[in-house]
Amino acid sequence: MSLDVDLVNPVEVMMPRRVPVRANGRVVYVPLSEWRKKHPFKGGPLYEQTRIVWTGNITHGLDRVAKACNLYRPIWTPGEEGIIVARDICSALATGLLVLETRTEMFRQHEPTNNWGRVEDLISFVSEYLAACNAWPDAVIEVWP
């Protein structure tokens, strides 16, 4: 089980097409141009017109880690926190990321015992999410549990 997050821009933009690939307990989106290096002649056009400017995925197994560093509610239930657009979540993501990066070992006790996610996976997800939010501050946040 995983949480999917989309940033949806108010207007369509031209974006590189991406291919979902499973890695380390989450789905990462690889640019089609990179994916084609291993799978030539597959995948269609390299760019597409879309409103979805970023998509992220994180295992629910890291919810205890997220709760421990005060990132659970902003990431898993942003609407309940009054978080509607990307700029609304930047502060919470930046603070949580700083705590995770400076106190990584402290959060290991909250990692899932079934090995479905590590603190480093949450750090990577939050870092990518924050960069996307800074790049697309007016994008609406959509969460799919």
Image: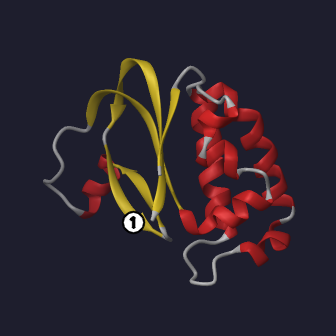
Residue hosting label 1: 22
The answer to whether residue 57 is above or below residue 6 is: below
Q: How is the image coloured?
A: secondary structure
Q: How many marks?
A: 1
Q: Which structural element holds mark 1? A: strand
In the rendered image, the quadrant that contains the N terminus is bottom left
From the viewer's side, name the closer residue of 37 and 4: 4
- Picture quadrant where residue 67 is located: bottom right
Residue name at image x 68 percent, y 42 percent: 74
Query: Residue at position x 55%, y 63% from top?
Result: 60
x%, y% of residue 20?
Answer: 34, 55
Residue 85 percent coordinates (x, y): 59, 25
Of 15 and 74, the residue lying toward us: 74
Residue at 56 percent across and 20 percent down: it is 138
Q: Is residue 66 above or below residue 45?
A: below
Amino acid marked by disc 1: Arg
Asked where in the image residue 103 lies, by quadrant, the reply is bottom right
The furthest residue to the front: 80
Left or right side of 24 for 82: right
Residue at far left of view: 41
Within 10 Å of disc 1 (Cα), the crowding (few <14, some 14-19, many 20+) is: few
Q: Which residue is located at x 25 percent, y 38 percent?
A: 46
Residue placed most toward the observer, 94 or 41: 94
In the image, residue 22 lies at what x, y percent?
A: 39, 66
Q: Residue lying furthest top in this view? A: 11
Using residue 106 as the reference point, say whether residue 130 is left or right of it: left
Q: Estimate the x, y position of residue 30 in percent, counting from the top left.
A: 39, 52
Does 102 sit left or right of 97 as displayed?
A: right
